[in-house]
Amino acid sequence: MLGRPAMVMLHFDGRMIIRYEGRDLAYREIPERQKRVQAVPVVRPKPPKYTPPPTHPWRVYRDRSPLSLPERP
């Protein structure tokens, strides 16, 4: 039956018949799907911006001129 056509017939009295290759198929109606409840988005506060302490190596000034570099042996 996969991928082959079936005929659905709705009668005026409310009956529904599903016919496949000349035979009526047994079926059962399924109830309507329940509505999904929208999830409430979680609002999280932003973490504070990191600032390195004054003793951090990034904050220590280094003179990079060639005169200030130590001599290599």
Image (tube, rainbow, N blue to C red):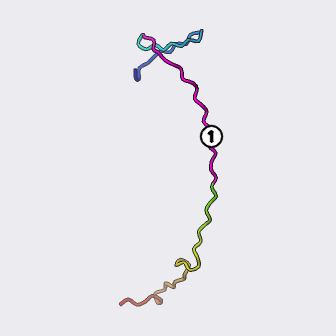
In magenta segment, residue 32: yes
- Near mark 1 (Cα within 10 A), the count class, few <14, some 14-19 or many ≥20, is few
In the picture, which quadrant includes the N terminus? top left
Residue found at x 58% / y 26%:
32
SS majority, magenta: loop
Count of labels in the image: 1
State the image coordinates of residue 71 (x, y, percent, origin top left): 40, 90
Residue found at x 61% / y 62%:
47
State the image coordinates of residue 56 (x, y, percent, origin top left): 54, 78
Residue 7 drawn above or below residue 63: above
In magenta segment, residue 40: yes
In the picture, which quadrant includes the C terminus? bottom left
Residue found at x 54% / y 82%:
61
Q: Amino acid at mark 1?
A: Gln
Residue 5 drawn above or below residue 34: above
Magenta stretch in the rendered image: 23-43
Residue 23 lies in quadrant: top left
State the image coordinates of residue 7 (x, y, percent, origin top left): 47, 15
Residue found at x 42% / y 10%:
22
User: Mark 1 = which residue?
Assistant: 38
In-image side of 43 versus 67 (left or right) = right
Residue 45 lies in quadrant: bottom right
Q: Please tell me which residue lies in front, 31 or 64.
A: 31
In the picture as drawn, the residue positioned furthest to the left comes out as 73
Residue 24 drawn above or below residue 44: above
